[in-house]
Amino acid sequence: MTDRYREGYVLTSDPGRVDIDRVHAWLSQESYWDKGRERAVVERSIAGSRPYSVYSQEQQATFARVVTDEATFAWIFEVFVDEHHRGRGLGTWLLESIVEDLSVLNVGLVYVPATSFTVWTVCRSLPNSGIRPERLDLAPPAT
């Protein structure tokens, strides 16, 4: 994906630009789904994924990652928008860009964790993407 620009922000899928420390802080301290996650695990998960980020000047404002075989399926994970940048449509722009990239690859099935209703809703609402988002319940089985 080439960088995209909007209202002073830049969106990129360049893994070399990801601020690992910032993403780790968001996920391990601010998110409800990755509380306490170790930095090394965050770093490995990003290395094994396709990361997407939005930046305001040089400061990272959003993060999401996609796990995909680049042919048939993709999972969108860990969508996060920094609290100082919320309410500006950055999360929607991020998701639209991800879905556009996956459409170019002809990926037809996008999985979204069941807890990510907003992500699932945005993916479903994109016209003519050719993508069929599916919610996937990742909750552990009851014992």
Image (cartoon, rainbow, N blue to C red):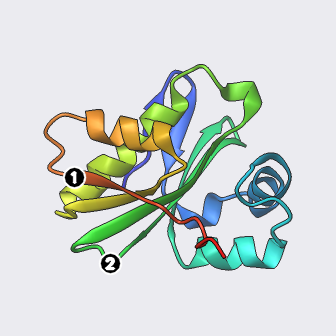
Q: Amino acid at mark 2?
A: Asp
Q: x and y percent of residue 88 in the render?
A: 57, 20
Residues packed near mark 2 inside 10 Å, few (<14), some (14 to 19) or many (20 plus): few
Secondary structure of the residue carrying tag 2 is loop
Q: Nearer the viewer, residue 30 or 64?
A: 30
Residue 121 figure quarter: top left
| Mark found first going from the N terminus, 1 or 2 | 2
Q: Nearer the viewer, residue 80 or 6?
A: 80
Q: x and y percent of residue 97 in the render?
A: 37, 44
Q: Is residue 36 left or right of residue 65?
A: right
The relative height of residue 7 versus residue 70 in the rendered view (above or below) is: above
> Residue 132's mark?
1
Secondary structure of the residue carrying tag 1 is strand
Q: Residue at point 33% right, 42% down?
A: 123
Q: Nearer the viewer, residue 74 or 96?
A: 74
Residues packed near mark 1 inside 10 Å, few (<14), some (14 to 19) or many (20 plus): few
Residue highlighted by disc 2: 69
Residue 108 figure quarter: bottom left
Q: x and y percent of residue 14 in the render?
A: 52, 61
